[in-house]
Amino acid sequence: MNLSLKFTGIILIFSSIFIVSCKRDIPSSVLDYREGVNFENIKIEKVFELTDYRPIFWVIPFPERVVALIPEGMGKTFEFFVYDYSGRIIENWKVNGGDGPNELRGIGPEEIISFNENEIIGIESRSGYIKSINLKTHEIKTIGKLSNIVRGYGSKYVIPRFSSTSIDRKGNSIVLGLVSTDFWDNGTHYFVKFDGIFRNFRVISKAEKEAIKILDRKTTEEIKRKKIISCDYYNALRTSIIFSVDWKREVVYYIPAIEEPFIEAISFDGKLRRKWKVDINFKKFKVKKEKIEEWCERAKSSPEPIFKILRQVTEIPPHAPPLQDIKVIEDRLLIITGNRNWDKEENETLVYHLPDMKYEGSFYLPFLHLRLHWFGNYYMTNGMIKKDDDWFGIRKLYSFEIK
């Protein structure tokens, strides 16, 4: 892993080189898109918002309350807050940061494998420990270590850091994206399925992001030769494993590359593979230079040592990427495009009926920055805001319903 990737998860050279899945020979069909056809059978409502001077790991919705996790002192301690939906603090407590059995290193939103009113269970990507958080007693317990539970974990594949993967939960069943231990050399990643705490673990499919290794070489060359590091606004998407699951039909839908308007599908048994091209003119998707520069300014203020020895250059892409995210809800597939209203902070989202992929229209989905994190019928969106020359973390929760 080169210097830029070792010190930060958001910096990479911008590249127009396409990332493709490992199955290049999959025949593709064209998904219909008609401008001006509105999908109106939805109800989206912001139900909670939290701003803090510290980074906010997540806010998880429950029927009567919201639970938030916020690190303090560079992870020396972690503070839990329980809010009602008006924003009033009901209770809060702290736990020690560390690798001890009753300590935390931090669990990202895509590392939470189960949650209920009593307990949250998640994986620490840095250590590979599975932790339980008791919301009643406030006790942290170490359930086990993934390398001792899943054969090949740590030597063949790992959970990527910075929540740069996807997770889809249905009852006790979970589909998760893992990356190979040499992901930054060959772009190999996996869709895996398991029940509960990694019972019946198996790989559904293997895929590859070919441009990862090209981006890595290019970044390394820039550092060695020019002593610069480029800020790529879309890097978190470019390197993430982005997918969603149709549990009814046991199919994983995923975005092999945000740079191309393609989505692919693989069934749980591996027998079905499909590929579609979304018929959109993505070269018209505008970027807002001021927003990207502001975001990269925040990245530059990071305390990471690399910014003391390298000069940061902000890359402004010619247009936004075609696709940003994907989500299956009941019998609909939502494809979140890069067509963003930057002032309203919302992106055009296309709706297709499953399984026939019939186009039903589009709507604009509100969110702050790049990706969404789903908790049942709610999604969390995260971002940063500037107040009096200081940056603050912000998280918003929305309820989502298809009527």
Image (tube, rainbow, N blue to C red):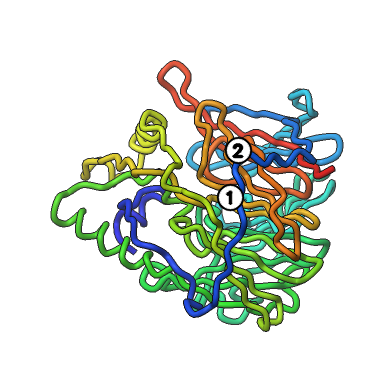
Provide residue 111's location: percent of width, then percent of height. 63, 57
Horizontal placement of 319 versus 138: left or right?
left
Residue drawn at (48%, 19%) of the image: 387
Residue neighbourhood size for the residue with mark 1, other residues' Cα within 10 Å, grouped as few (<14), some (14–19), many (≥20): many
Residue at the image position 46 percent from the left and 48 percent from the top: 282
Estimate the x, y position of residue 215 in percent, counting from the top left.
32, 61
Q: Using the image, determine if residue 355 lies above or below residue 75.
A: below
- In-front residue for pair 177/127: 177
Which amino acid type is shown beneath numbered disc 1? Answer: Gly
State left or right for residue 191 relative to residue 248: left
Q: Residues within 10 Å of mark 2 (few under 14, many from 20)?
A: many
Query: Which residue carries the number 1 mark?
Result: 106
- Residue 384 can be seen in this image: yes
Considering the image in quadrants, where does the C terminus appear? Answer: top right
Q: Where residue 203 sits in the image (x, y, percent)?
A: 63, 78
The residue shown at (56%, 31%) is 345
Give the amino acid type for the residue marked by disc 2 in the picture.
Ile
Query: Residue 20 vs residue 375: left or right?
Result: left
Q: Quadrant of residue 354?
A: bottom right
Element on which disc 2 rests: strand
> Who is closer to the viewer here, 259 or 7?
259
Q: Quadrant of residue 402?
A: top right
Q: What is the secondary structure assignment of the residue under circle 1?
A: loop
Q: Is residue 111 above or below residue 290?
A: below
Check the picture and name the quadrant holding the N terminus: bottom left
Residue 401: where, in percent of width, then height?
80, 42
Q: Which residue is mark 2?
A: 70
In the visual, does 77 lie left or right of 185?
A: right
